[in-house]
Image: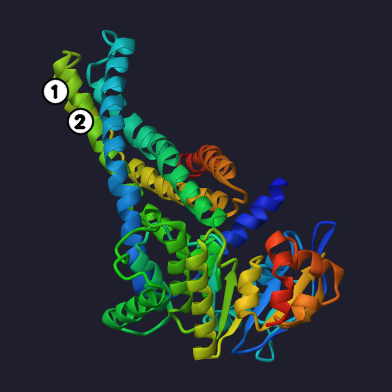
Amino acid sequence: MIRVSGVDKSFGDKAVLKGIDASFDAGQVNFMIGRSGSGKSVLTKCIVGLLEVDAGTVQYAGEDFTTLSSKEREEIRLQIGMLFQGGALFDSMTVLENVVFPLRMFHSMDAEEREERAMECLKRVELEGAEHRYPAEVSGGMQKRVALARAIVGRPRYLFCDEPNSGLDPQTAIVIDNLIRDLTQEYKTTTVVISHDMNSVIEIGDNIHFLHEGTVAWRGDRKGILDSGVKELDTFVYASDLMRSIKGKLQGR
Amino acid sequence: MGLLFHIGRYFAFMASALRRPQKGRVFAQATIIELEAIGVQSLGIVALLSLFMGAVIAIQTAHQVGGWVPAYTIGFTVRQTMILEFAPTIIPVILSGKVGSNIASQIGTMQVTEQIDALEVMGVRSISYLVLPKLLAALVIFPFLVVIAMVLGIGAGAWICDAADLSSFADYEYGIQMDFKAFDVTYALIKTCVFALIITSVSAYHGYHTSGGAKEVGRSSTKAVVYSVVIVMVANLVITQLLLT
């Protein structure tokens, strides 16, 4: 479980996060949604330690990450897998080398075991056959799936996915959504997904945080999100004609 | 941002870069790759420039002083120029354009495409992982390149003297042996090692602190070359003053 309490973060005079309280539960797909600039990515970077918080705490299983030494942080980071929005694949390595990389760095497996584990992950994301290609030689959607395979290869306790479906076709997006949900349930991972994709939220969101102007404006589950009574959230959820047209149907689910 | 800010951040960066590698085998493999990228891939340009510069210095010397100083002066001048300045200073300056810009753009691209964030989130100490192999490889390979440059430059001088009838080979040979001080080579190699560290670390520093997109990567690459060259020139003056006076 990850618990965030009273987190503030500013850049110069601009306060991006204002006293954020949030908790992300193990074995659940936790969503952070909100408009662009609402602070989702900054909050995620604060949680994984890529940015330092100005105030507040970030606890991993009760341990305050913000006060740990860099060595102690490394221990926690070994339990984190992260899928970046752009994939962030190492372009000088093949697909297989990318997936094997965390194992090479931190696990005492022999080369054969490492490759076997990596191939297993590539199979899960339906990418067998692409292992010897370079990131530049595969499509954007495939890069996302390679990045997901790399994020899960170390069997992380905490999985962060930044816009996992952006740039993907609807069919692949569903494959990725289902995979995130299955992995979360199988390994009891604390999964945090940052997304604008309401389809994903409705399909796999267990625990949803809506961020608005640097604060958590609403928290609940996928049923509650459809009639939250929070004006900003309603505007966000029913921004598209499609969502408005299926509003009644969704609320009946 | 002020000069003091950059100096402080540079030293903090170097302290991170010089931390013990997390995985010895990965570090060794990365260093071998860098030896190839920095050294082997620079061999062609180093050889080409040294050959032409050696020959040109020989012709210029013959043109300037030919007739009123002994012919062996050509060999002596080529040797001194190649050992004291061209090989240990000009070759690293040229390499800062090739190797330095390459390092800055490679690390800069990794920064703007979140590859460095990915390393950090995995628990990899990104600065040490990316920079230490380059530093070590440059420290090992630059002296070899410089020695090759010295030999080729002096050799090219001998060839042009013979081919253009500037002096006899015996005179040239006498000139390159005359009043030879082994310490000159030591001085040249000390300079080379310092310049290797400056070029790789300053370039890596600029690449690592890139933010934005392709334009900023290009800017970092330019800054890496400009700052490396300026710092190399200042260091050259300081080291020369310290070691030769």
Chain under callout 2: B
A31 relative to A238 in the view: left or right: left
Say if labels 2 and 1 share a chain: yes
Q: Residue at x 55, y 83 (%)?
A: A75
Residue B65: % across, % down: 32, 12
**Mark 2 secondary-structure assignment:** helix
Q: Amino acid at mark 1?
A: Phe
- Number of residue marks: 2
Residue B211 showing in the rendered view: yes
Relative vertical location of residue B64 with respect to residue B106 in this rendering, above or below: above
Question: Which residue is farthest top?
Answer: B67
Dot 1 lies on which element? helix
Q: Amino acid at mark 2?
A: Gly
Q: Position of residue B190 (x, y in %)?
A: 41, 48
Write down the residue under mark 2. Answer: B155
Say which quarter of the image contains residue B139: bottom left
The answer to whether B207 is drawn above or below residue A19 in the figure is above
Mark 2 vs 1, N-terminal side: 2
Residue at 51 percent across and 78 percent down: it is A178
